[in-house]
Amino acid sequence: MTDIVTGQIVRVRSRQYLVEEVVSKPTKEQDTKVSLSCLEDDALGESLEVLWEREIDAKIVGATSWDSIANRGFDNPRLFSAYLHTLRWNCVTSTDAKLFQAPYRAGIEVKAYQLEPLRKALLMPRVGLFIADDVGLGKTIEAGLILREMLMRQKVRRVVISCPPSVVRQWQEEMESRFGLTFMILDREFIAARRQERGYGINPWMTHTRFIISHALLRDETYTAPLRDWLGDFAAASMLILDEAHNAAPASGAKYAVDSQLTKTVRDLAPRFEHKLFLSATPHNGHSNSFAALLEILDPQRFCRGVPVRNRKLLDTVMVRRLKQDLREIGEEFPQRYVLPIVIDNLPEDAPELKLSRLLQQYRNLREEKLKDAAKSTQTTAMLVITSLQKRLLSSIEAFARTLKVHRTGMEKQAAHSTSIHQASLPLLFESPGADDERAEFSEEEVIAEEDAQMAAASMQAAGQTARELAILNEMADVANSSRYQPDPRIQQLVEWIRQNLCPDLGQPNAAWLERRVIIFTEYTDTKRYLQQQLSTYAK
């Protein structure tokens, strides 16, 4: 006689059922008929009638035996309380936007003001936040807190961080050391390694869930096309973190903002992500059209390209913007920055710096006069060369002397090469590689070689030299070469400052250095080497 009764839970045919009726077998040779109701989610309530003795896997699922629960004793009350509160905390913070977990999972000391972006982000149905805090306030930490919280709440599963090439490694290290998050850097080496492991047809974006890619590579369709395939039209639980987001703002110098390649790429990719974080200490480039276009990429429901952003309340909804002076007023301590110019005057008239400056201005005037009837592009390129020489002269005579030599060589070759050159192909004559330039990853020697090539190309486009121009070039070369290795007045002033503030016995054997330190910034590699050479003579 079977012991199955109505109300029991049984397992039949790999599913759990509730026993609704039991019809006992009339004779010993017959079987017990049992009416069941399914308890599984995918077939809840479905009826089933079985002959109990004929079922192969029929089994009664007994109730939990309370006698076996405490056979190993009870936990310490304090330990059990901690466990219970942990469960309760996790349950609450999964739904309550006012309770945070991320600050307690980060290997950093979080400042109170750094929690504001996290608070704001959690109040949004979909995160669309622009963190525009001042330099040094910890935008990376604020973004990491938001990302960590969203991951723990299981609202984010896929993350793409796009940043300037120069900080790709920094982002990877900070995410891992501060938040315990492993990111893959998607670059040529990563793709080559994945293709070698899994075949040439593999989509590298599908091999992990968290990536970091530089702006320079994000602009490349070779990397963007597989990313679009990975995301589809819209990827739920995905987040885009765009560092230095102002680089994605359209360039604007006129009535309309003109999209750069990065702008077009971000505009296409952003709607495919469910959550978006933009980071920049300089969100506004001075052009309202460009700023509005950037905000439209972040939140097209609130902002529209071409419509100036005048509603401050609307902007505050999606942007967090704090300056250091604002936070000082509420008690945060930040070092005060003072800009103290050191004026160097009373130089003799024949000082190399002054003499070269006068000669270069004469050379500029002669070039302008000679090219006044030339094509506009030729005039612009020629003046770009002069401006580049002026910038290097202001940096150091060493930088000026080397670039002047390249310019003279290019002028000598110009007769055989009269092709036109577009300004866009001469970016290093405008400025040195910035953080968002892919050349930021190049070695100094590679950057110098490209600078020289662009200077030579620009010099070769100009018209031939007059005798007077040639004479000035030769005179500038003589002055620069004779004084390029000598300490200029700025070096002497710097040495005196070091002696007063860092090393009173500078130049003496075994001179003792104070605890204070100094950082010297310079734009050109030639000037850096010149500074090293000059300062090392005093430190011996």
Image (cartoon, grey):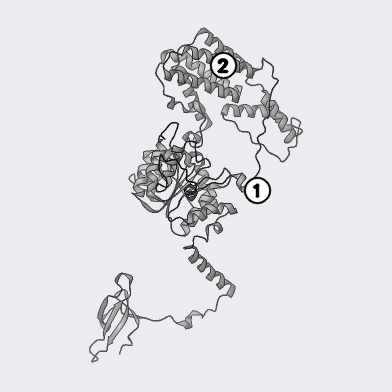
Q: Is residue 47 above or below residue 441?
A: below
| Residue in the image at 64% along x and 48% along y | 329
Crowd rating for badge 1 (residues with CA inside 10 Å; few <14, some 14–19, many 20+):
few
**Which residue does the image show at 64% across and 47% down from the upper left?**
328
Give percent across and percent down for residue 36. Answer: 29, 80
Q: Which residue is mark 2?
A: 361
Identify the disc placed on residue 333.
Answer: 1
The mark total stands at 2
Q: Residues within 10 Å of mark 2 (few under 14, many from 20)?
A: few
Compared to residue 433, the image places residue 125 above or below, namely below
Examine the rendered structure and indicate whether residue 16 appears above or below residue 241.
below
Relative height, residue 141 to residue 69 (above, below): above
Which sits in the foreground, 262 or 61?
Answer: 262
Q: Quadrant of residue 216?
A: top left
In the current view of this chain or complex, which residue is farthest to the top? 467
Looking at the image, tell me whether mark 1 or mark 2 is earlier in sequence order.
Answer: 1
Q: Is residue 322 visible?
A: yes
Residue 251 x, y percent position in the rendering? 44, 34
- Give me the residue at 34% from left, 44% from top: 200
Answer whether residue 195 is visible to the viewer in this image.
no
Check disc 1 and give the amino acid type.
Glu
Front position in the image: 356 or 227: 356
Name the quarter where the C terminus is drawn: top right
Q: Residue furthest bottom?
A: 27
At horizontal 53% and vertical 8% (from top left) the residue drawn is: 468
Q: Nearer the viewer, residue 4 or 249?
A: 249
Task: For mark 1, give the secondary structure.
Answer: loop
Residue 460 point in image, percent of width and height: 45, 17
Secondary structure found at label 2? helix
Quadrant for residue 395, please give it: top right
Disc 2 marks a residue whose amino acid type is: Gln
What is the distance, in whole Å, between disc 1 and disc 2 at their CAs?
47 Å
